Amino acid sequence: MLFQIPPIVNKAIPEKEGTIGGVEGNPLAPLIARLWQAAVIAGSLALLIFLVWGAIDWLISEGNPEKVKNAQNKILHSLFGLGLLAATYAIMWFLRNVFEFDILNLVWPTPE
């Protein structure tokens, strides 16, 4: 061949999927971390949508007690969702700092 085409390398993706702390063959740890991050992102988007939806419903309720109550319930439920999202972060922090167990960065013991 006249010239060689260099391989395409995406620097945003690690070379070997599932390597944590130099230990290969551990696809569970990155999967757990990605699932948790995706759940937090999806929950945050849902929280924002329901919070705004409840506020708009309250504004256009025209004083109707049933519509106001439904709007207040949407806002209240979205705030409960915020509490759940904060609780997941608090649990991760508690496990990491008190028990020194980082579920988002699992390192599996390997035989030597």
Image (cartoon, grey):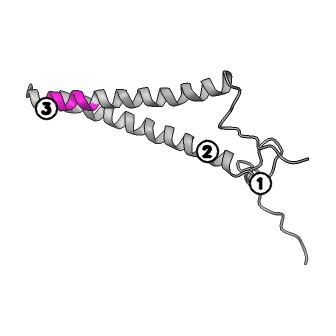
Q: Is residue 2 above or below residue 26?
A: below
Above or below: residue 33 compared with residue 67: below
Q: Amino acid at mark 3?
A: Lys
Magenta span contains residue 70 = yes
The residues bearing labels 3 and 1 have C-alpha atoms spaced at a distance of 54 Å
The residue that disc 1 covers is 25
- Left or right of 60 on screen, residue 18: right
Q: Residue furthest front?
A: 111
The reply to whether callout 3 and callout 2 are in contact (CB within 8 Å) is: no
Of badges 3 and 2, nearer the viewer stands 2
Residue 82 place in picture, x, y as percent: 41, 28
Residue 109, numbered circle: none
The answer to whether marks 3 and 1 mark residues whose Cβ atoms lie closer than 8 Å is no
Q: Residue at x 38, y 34 (%)?
A: 47
Query: Which residues, given as a range, are shown in magenta?
Result: 67-74
Q: Is residue 62 visible?
A: no
Report which quarter residue 58 is drawn in. top left
Q: Picture coordinates of residue 1 (x, y %)?
A: 90, 78
Q: Residue under circle 2?
A: 32
- The reply to whether discs 2 and 1 touch (Cβ–Cβ < 8 Å) is no
Which residue is rendered at x = 77% and y = 44% of the image? Answer: 108
10 Å crowding of disc 2: few (<14), some (14-19), many (20+):
some
Which residue carries the number 3 mark?
67
| Amino acid type of the residue tagged 1 in the rendering | Gly
